[in-house]
Each structure stands twice: as C-alpha cells, then as structure tokens.
Image: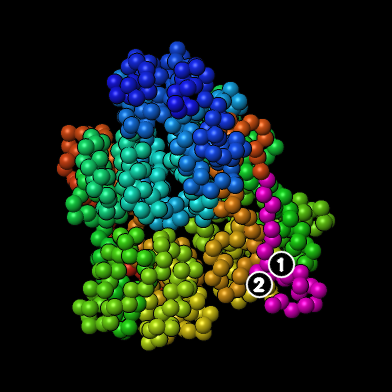
Amino acid sequence: MADVAKAAGVSTMTVSRALRGDPSVTKERRAHIVMTAERMGYILDRGASQLRTRKTGFVAVTVPSINNPNFADSVRGLTAVLEENGLQVLLGFTDYDIEREELMISQLLRRQPEALVLTGSTHTSAAREMLARTSIPVIETWDEPDQPLGYSVGFSNTYAGALMAQHLIDTGCREIAFVGCTTGTDYRGEERARGFMEALKKNGAVADRYIEAGLPPLGAQAGAEAVRKILENYPKTDAVMCVADSVAFGAMTELQRAGINVPGQIAIAGFGAYDVSEFCSPSITTINPNAHEIGKLTGEMIANILSTPSQAATIKHQRSQPILIKRGSTVGH
Amino acid sequence: MSVEKKKQRSGKSIKIDDVAREANVSIMTVSRALRGVEGVSEAKRTEIFEIAEKLRYQPNFNARSLVNVQSSLIGISFPTLFNDVFAEMLDGMRPTLESAGFTTIVTTHEYDGARELDWIETVRYWRPAAVVMTGIDHDPKVRRVLRRDQIPTLELWEHTDDPIDLCVGIDHEKAGEQIANEMIELGYRRPAYVGWGRGHDYRSEKRLTGIRKAFSAAGLGGVRTARTGGTDHYRAGFNGTKRLVSDQSTRPDIVFCHSDHFAFAGMMACESLGLSAPEDIGIVGFNSLSINNVLPRRITTVEVERREMGAVGARQLIARINGIGGNLSKRFEPKVRYGATTRTPTMMTGKTTA
C-alpha cells in the first residue's frame, strides 16, 4: 500500500481511505488512486477495503469462446450447482489465446474470487506462476492435465479423437481427413486430432490429412470451405472428421450441394453433440463430451473444497467420459 | 521546461489544448480520441492517450452526466450463452472496449431478473467503468442502483425512449410487425409462431406481439403458437413446428420462428411430414444467423447488424464514460432478407428468382 501511496503522491492513510470508499476523499482523487493501484497490480487486501470485509461470493471462469454450445452447457451446469451454494459465476472470454487468458486471470484474481475455473491445461508460464501463488482453488476443465495446477475435471481429448477414428475404420473408411483449427490455437482440438491420427496410423489408414480451416471458433462456413479444399486436393477421401459439429454441419451441406452422397460417398463426423447435429438430415455422428456434466462436477468439486477445506486434497481429478453417438452421416439409415 | 512542469509551477491545471499542442493535433482530435469516437487512427489514439497520461490530463469530471469511473472493468450481462446473437454483439463490442483499455467480464442470468439484480450488487462493488445489459426489461431496482451509483450503462439489443442511461438496439415489436406485414403482402393468411415458453424471452414476445398486431390490423385471424422449454434451439424448433403442422385441418400457411435455428429445424420437421417450403408452407426465421450462409435452401429471415450494433454501443458507451452527456442512444433498423423458404416479392410480380 505504501508503494501505491508513493506512486499516487498521497499518504498511505489516504490510499486506505480511498480504497475503503471513505467520503473524505474526493471522487477525482479516489479515481486516481484506484487507477494507480490497479495499474500496479495491487490486490485490495482485507484491511484495505470493504470488499474484503465479506466474502466476494463469486467464482471466476475463463472460457475460450462465447460462441460454443459445449462451453455454454458447462457454464450452465456449473452455474446451477454454484447458485445452490450461494455463489455467482463471472466469465472472462479468452478467444483461444493464452496470453489473453493470462491477462484475464490477473484481472480476475485481483477481485478475489472464491475459486477459479479454467478451460484447458495450456497456460503461459506467467499465468502458471500467478496460479501457483494464489491460495484459492484452481480447477482446470475439459482436459486431463499433465501438470495439474490443482484440481481438474475433464476427459482425454486424444482418447475422444481415437474413439471416432476407430468408428470410421470400423465402417470401412480408409482415406480420412480431419478438419481442425490453425495449429497453435485450439489445444484441445489438436489433442483430438493427434489421438485421431495415431489411431488411423495404428490401423494402417492414411493419416496425413489435417486440414487447417482457420482460427477458432470455427463455424459452418469454415466446414464448407474445408470440404472444397478436400475435394480438390484429396478426391479419394471417404470420410471427414471435424473438430466440432458446427463445422461438420457446414461440411455436410457443402457435400450435398456438390451432389455427393453422405455417407454413401463420404462419411461425416463431428464432435460436441451440438443440437444441430441431431436435427439435420442425415443426422451427424458425433461424440458427446458430456459438457453439462463437466460443469456440474466442477461446481460440486468447488462447493466441496470451500465447505471442507481440510479434506480438499482427497480428490484431485474428476473424469468425465466422452461417448460416441453413431448416426446417419456415417452409418446410413 | 515541459508543459507539465510549467503548469504545476503556475498552479494551473492541464487543459485539453495542452494535450493537443503536445500531441501536435487539433483539440477536436484529442476529444475524439479520448471519447473513443471514429476518425482517429489507432496509432494516433494510443499516442494521444500516452501524452494525456504523461501530462496527467484529467477530463472535466463535472461535465460528466453519469460518472463514477473507478476501474477499467466493464461488466456485461447476457441472458444465456446459448445464442449466437449475444456472441456476435460481444464480438462487436470487445475490440472497441479493449483498445480503449477496458476489460470485459461477462455473466449470464438465464432470463432471470433476480439473478441480474444479484450480479449488479456484486459488480457495483468493483466500481466498474460501466455495465452493459441485454434489453430494457430489468428489475426496477437495477435502474435505481445504477442511477444512484452513476454507473454509465448501456442497454444493448433493444431500443427505448427511456433507457437507464443509453441504449443501442432495435424495436422488437416493430420488427415483428414489419416481417408480418411483408408476409401478408405475399398472400399468407394463417400465421403461427414457434418459440420459447412465456416469460422466457421478452424480446421474442414483443416480436410475437408485433406479428399479432399486423395480422389483426389486416383483419386476419389470430396467431397460433407452439412454445417449448429447454435450451436446445433445434429441438424446440423441430418439436414446436411439428406440433403446429401435423394436423392438416388447422395447418398454418406461414410459420414465424424465434430464430433461424428454430426455422431450420422447423423446415426439417416439415420435410419429415412430406411438406416442403415454400410450396406447402412458408417458414420465416429471425436474426439471419451464420447457419443461413451454408444452407442449400436459405431461410427468409430478418437481418439485424448485430456486430455493428455492438461496436456502436461500445463507442457510445466510451463517449459516456469520457464525459459526453445527453442522449447517446441509437436505434437500428432491421431488414427482411428473402431466402427460399417463403414466397418472395419477385415471385409475386411474375419474375423468376436468380
């Protein structure tokens, strides 16, 4: 606090008063002090602010994209459980960018959440350091981290990829492409692609067709464009797995537009069990990651840790099981 | 001697013209840069910000109508993440807010006014630079709290003449009326509507009110409705439409849907019953969602510039944060975009569609 006082050119007492919201500090001066404190990364501690005289009552969550039914479902599951426990959920969107995640984490930690939920297990080293220092529970979701920061809830994305590869092999496909994001952006999608390719290789199938369809989040249009690329470069392709169902839907409509039968000539598979994949024609084979369950398990884990801090260390990882859903786009009617 | 030192010595405060002189630009450019309005390049804006900060220039706080700027944080509240509409508006807002140095934190209230109020109670402790809320229907206490705390507030996605502070959006009832009138013009006479349960989405209800008004003004019958709960748009659209069209004796000739996702699933439901659009039935969506870009048969829909709406909302909000008073609200006008799921005006005049 003394540092903030020095930088703002006021006394320590004034900083304390300003941060407490004491009316003896003018509005302008308070704004200046708060801005200075924020710029310096000063965390309002218990004595310094009315903020800390009570629990903040919220859990911070970083999510890669607002535009993704899976994350939406997880957030809904998480919110439902936490709300029952009197906790609010506040979200920061990272746009699949770990540097933004780092910024978000530092902003959120400054507001003293009761717990922090992250999507994925790839973080910048600065973020890792910050998270190692914090005393609140940190939960990584949608992944099985190699180096967990604390707690985790999720599944192995390589396993999910392998699951779909095996299904496509079983239906007789051999020339299979994977449509994903530009490498280095969607880590979990890449893990799925890795598991997918490894399984193809193990079965002696072609395993070199990773089609980069752009930056996440990918939508239907990206799927349509990727399919045009595939038809041009690999005309013998007999199956296409897409990183998400939205992409698979676009890929399928583009094939249909080109007069190519799905699954007769080319099979299509997605990931995420999005609503659209069930109601299009043919319906799309997909993997249900049990997104809602991930959120729910995360919420329960947090409630548990906060209510019984002494036993907090017992369960560190909760596994959710992705499930293959076979539909018309790979197995016909 | 620098401007700063001179002023400090003479005891005068730094004025906007000092910043302008130091940055070698006009006062208007400084003002534009600080207010976040267009016409200043990003590079210039950054330079001006740096100079303003170096000189410790404080914009005239007294000129601000609703000012209690304390942090760089902007709280945003959406009903749900299960909707591309909010994603696109957020996409439109964030680059503008973030390049002006603000961080956005989002919450969802699942169409529950009490939860939105709870959120306001949490966020106000952070002394946010501003808050953004969806639509204009809130618990009355939300308005009181935000006005009392003088927190700049943007209500996005819906327009009203009486916002809490400022609003940027469309008039949803008029949008419903507009699309319904065009469909009446095309000869449709037996309307139906597929959407969520009552009390769930106020804006969708307002559009339905507009549709009802239009048909009733044309002396035509009432609008049948099929409502569903849940969060799955396609499931709701499929089941709702199926319910409406199954019985031939009461079958509507036009189905207005809550969104394009509802409409696509509605089209699938019709096809599963051997009905196709537009030959047997007309299907109308709302919001021109991205799915429509890949459909072999595009849905007739209502287009709203949501990204632009987000961007304009963000700029207006920054202007407010920076002390610009008065009415900063903007109204957007939706447009009907014809696809291949309804008759079209060109069809009616006998021309073929391209």
Q: Does residue A46 show up?
A: no
Out of A325 and A123, give the one closest to the viewer.
Answer: A123
Q: Give the range drawn in magenta.
A: B331-354
The picture places residue B71, in percent across and down from the top left corner, at: 44, 31
Question: Residue flagged by tag 2: what amino acid is it?
Answer: Ala
Q: Name the residue under label 2.
A: B340
Q: Residue A82 carries which label?
A: none
Q: In this view, does A311 lie above or below A189?
A: above
SS under mark 1? loop
Residue A282, percent from left and from top: 47, 75
Farthest residue to the front: give it.
B1
Taking B162 as reference, is A67 above or below it? Answer: below
Residue B345: percent from left, percent from top: 76, 69
The residue that label 1 is drawn on is B253
Residue depicted at x 54% and y 70%: B294
Q: Could you say which quadrant of the image residue A34 lies in?
A: top left
Q: Are marks 2 and 1 on the same chain?
A: yes
Label 2 crowd (10 A; few <14 / some 14-19 / many >=20) = some
The image shows residue B41 at horizontal and vertical percentages of: 53, 48
